[in-house]
Image: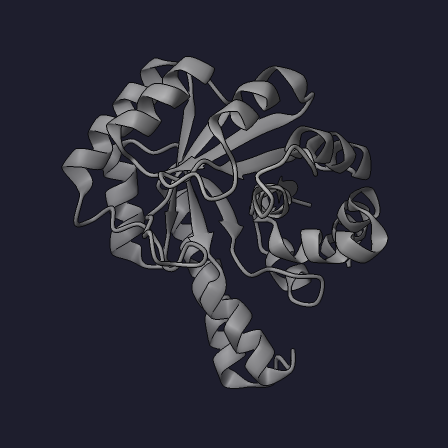
Amino acid sequence: MPLLGVNIDHIATIRQARRGSEPDPVRAAHEAELGGADIITVHLREDRRHIQDHDVQRLAPFIAVRLNLEMAATDEMVSIARRLRPHMCTLVPEGRHEITTEGGLDVAGERKRLATAVRRLRAAGVMVSAFIDAEPDQIAASADAGFDACEIHTGPYAAAFAAAGGDFARTNLRDELAKVADAGEFIRANRMRFNAGHALNYQNVRAVAALPEVAELHIGHAIVSRAVFAGLRTAVADMKAAMKG
């Protein structure tokens, strides 16, 4: 079974609604660990809409599991990551007007710039992953740029799952899952780690978790949504159970 990375950004979203001190993302990370999280994922956005610099600074030495820092490939973010040295950085596209990350990174179109960021991060001992769409040219470009891993954007699969009501007899749903599976095979053929994430929830996660050699799933919104009613520790444990099927 793949490792579970729990994204706790939306704990900080609630806190930032009042610009206060609670709920504390570090406390959330601890609860997620107790629920079985293998990785804690946070996205330090350029506009600091949820996770703040001090959150990442406190998380890095506090958590017992791995820290995955999602970020844009800017000089500022690369410098922060080189100083804090999380286990892994996932480079993502970032737009100020988007609600959440929409679409994968265009590695093929920005290979030179991204390769420079990858070299700087790897020189600091940080693994680097690219959040990309399930497209062969993006995977090949990621390998050429020196990425250690690719996280496949599972949003199209999740949308197809919802439209089909989870019925894998529907051609579109089977096709979207096959795209993720084929991308994973190509990633592994290029000697990179195969991760996946975005819009995965308790209903649609099992089919992705069962794909051959998928190493990590990064999930946030669904877990935090359930945590509102069940508590974060229970919500994480429930997701681990859903991944097992």
Tell me residue 123's x, y (percent): 32, 14
Q: Quadrant of the C terminus?
A: bottom right
In front here: 58 or 236?
A: 58
In front here: 9 or 117?
A: 9
Tell me residue 172's x, y (percent): 48, 81
| Left or right, residue 10 beside residue 78 | right
Residue 113: quadrant of the picture: top left
Question: Which residue: 58% across, 48% down?
Answer: 17
Count of numbered circles on the image: 0
| Left or right, residue 150 beside residue 206 | left
Q: Relative to 177, does residue 123 appear above or below in the rendering? A: above
Residue 76: quadrant of the picture: top left
The colour scheme applied to this rendered structure is: one colour
Q: Relative to 220, does residue 30 appear above or below in the rendering? A: above
Tell me residue 87's x, y (percent): 51, 23
Tell me residue 81's x, y (percent): 40, 22
In front here: 187 or 228?
A: 228
Residue 153: quadrant of the picture: bottom left
Question: Which residue: 77% across, 54% down?
Answer: 228
Q: Quadrant of the N terminus?
A: top right
